[in-house]
Amino acid sequence: MLADLPIRRSTTQTNSAHLAVQAGTSSGRLVHCLNSIQLAAIFFDSGGRVSLCTESAQRLLANLGIARSAAASVLQLLLALRRATAPSRRELFQQLRRAVDEQAHAAFEITFQNQMVRAELHPVEGEGWALTGEDVSARRAAEASAADMARLDPLTGLPNRLLLRERLDQALARLRRGEEACALLLVDLDRFKPVNDTLGHPVGDALLVKVAERLRSTVRPTDTVARIGGDEFVVLQTAIREPADTQALARRLVDLIGRTYMVDGHLLTIGASVGVAFAPADGQDADRLLKNADLALYRAKLDGRGTFRFFEPEMDARMQARRQLELDMRQALARREFQLHYQPQLNLKTNQLTGCEALIRWRHPERGMVSPLDFIPLAEEIGLIVPIGEWVMRQACRDAVSWPAPLSVAVNVSPAQFKSDRLVEMIVSALATSGLPAARLEVEITEGVLLQESEKTLQTLHRLRDLGVRVSMDDFGTGYSSLSYLRSFPFDKIKIDRSFVKDLAVKPDGNAIIRAIAGLGQSLGMTTIAEGVETPEQMERIREEGCTDVQGYLVSRPVPADEIVRLIGSCQ
Ligand SMILES: Nc1nc2c(ncn2[C@@H]2O[C@H](COP(=O)(O)O[C@H]3[C@@H](O)[C@H](n4cnc5c(=O)[nH]c(N)nc54)O[C@@H]3COP(=O)(O)O)[C@@H](O)[C@H]2O)c(=O)[nH]1
């Protein structure tokens, strides 16, 4: 049908909206056709007068408040449109005016009383003009709503990272104009993961929604609360008069999130750690502010969580140092920079060595000897303890197999290693490849291991025990519930923390504690070994209180593998 019409497609534009009109039209058929496809179109002759106006175009003009008579010519129509729309559109109409003067195609949009019309002005070769119009209000509204949705977190309805970023950029622009300071508070939920893991994601999601409501309820309407990750929220506080405003808000956030929640019949308690960065003091661009708030958050977590910290420049330096240590540690395994030292354990009754504890050492080419206290916690935090711990286990088994039986080797196993499903298989493999009997391997764990996923952990411990591996409880007495853990698993050995041995000389009740633990071990059929024994007096008191074994500098400091072989030989 279009072929019948006096319309031809522009050579450069294939879209049907981009039409050029040929001379010599049969206007009756054309109007009929355009009316039936609901196209708003107005044709102007070479004198600029309206020669054809479809029904849709008439309705559109009426909606825009433009009288039909006003549309008598192109210029009159443009003037009427100019009067009908906002001053911000005036520039557009100047462009249109130019298009008319230059006989060029032009496309534009008119917003009028919530209605949006996309219009196109097409020059008709030597004959006049065609103006087409399309109501795009619904399409533009859908696009705007999609754009809004793309800036909101679907679960909580809070702004997401994208919108936060825009608001932060706006706040920083105001700051640059000297208007107001702002602060960024990065909020990370503590103990959220166990809720998700144990009660399932629907409960976790409902909890996040409640957290979002609490956060929203505690800020001013001018502030922004955003959700930027699973359990990560951000508050952008604007118009700050003094840092105390932000301090009060940070305290409120920690307190509010830490209050109990009732979700799906479950009483839940989580916490929040908050890191704060101020603009302009801690950064004037969004990236720096976010980075510095993150550093402050990291500090808050290190300081025990459930608290807030303000960014300090030293945090950056500390983080750089930590990153370098992490990089070095990742290379240390491949570069064979780790070594094992061994510290002997002595039975007080027989005066014979019973075994040795394997203690890792890191000989760094520039740092020198790095203490495990300086790198094991970081290795645990970033998960590197799993490969490092595997190396320790395999090396310890390889070294111990050359010691005379029944001497055993005790290996520290970290909580993070217990999370790995491969732990038991790895130990079986270390024993098999080294040829060390399982009974000569002892696994030392701390309370931290039992604190996590206790059911799974206990299963792992029982599997190890079934293999014949012995299990000892390290640092006994320093945790919160050492006693209760003794009931949950039949340990082979209790290692009394060296702080109690140290207290022997200084605290009047020092020996009472050692006596109590030794008695407990005796009743439960467990070996009790006192750590950190440095003097003959300490050794004597420990023997008197009933401990079975000792370990400490008095017997020997931890020594390299070849030296322990000599030491063992000299004791035989
Ligand atoms: N997961 C792993 N942890 C490990 C491994 N190797 C060591 N560690 C842990 O690092 C902590 C520090 O260890 P280290 O500096 O080796 O200190 C040990 C001994 O040197 C020290 N000790 C022993 N006797 C004495 C003494 O008489 N006085 C004194 N002041 N210190 C002494 O005690 C540490 C042994 O502690 P423990 O493990 O609790 O028996 C330490 O927590 C290690 O556990 C590893 O391979 N994996």
Image (cartoon, helix red, strand yellow):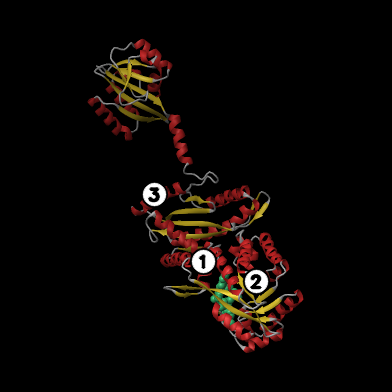
The amino acid pointed to by label 2 is Leu
Q: Secondary structure at mark 1?
A: helix
Relative image position of residue 400 (x, y in whole percent): 61, 74
In this rendering, the answer to whether 406 lies above or below 51 is below
The amino acid pointed to by label 1 is Leu
Circle nearer the N terminus (1, 2): 1
What distance separates the C-alpha of mark 2 from that of mark 3?
Answer: 62 Å
- Quadrant in the picture for the N terminus: top left
- Quadrant in the picture for the C terminus: bottom right
Residue at which label 1 appears: 378
Q: Residues within 10 Å of mark 2 (few under 14, many from 20)?
A: many
Q: Residues within 10 Å of mark 3 (few under 14, many from 20)?
A: few
In this rendering, the answer to whether 549 lies above or below 54 is below
Circle nearer the N terminus (3, 1): 3
Residue at which label 2 appears: 441
In this rendering, the answer to whether 40 lies above or below 426 is above
Disc 2 to disc 3: CB gap under 8 Å? no
Question: Does the image show residue 65?
Answer: no
Q: Secondary structure at mark 2?
A: strand
Q: Nearer the viewer, mark 2 or mark 3?
A: 2
Relative image position of residue 160 (x, y in whole percent): 48, 47
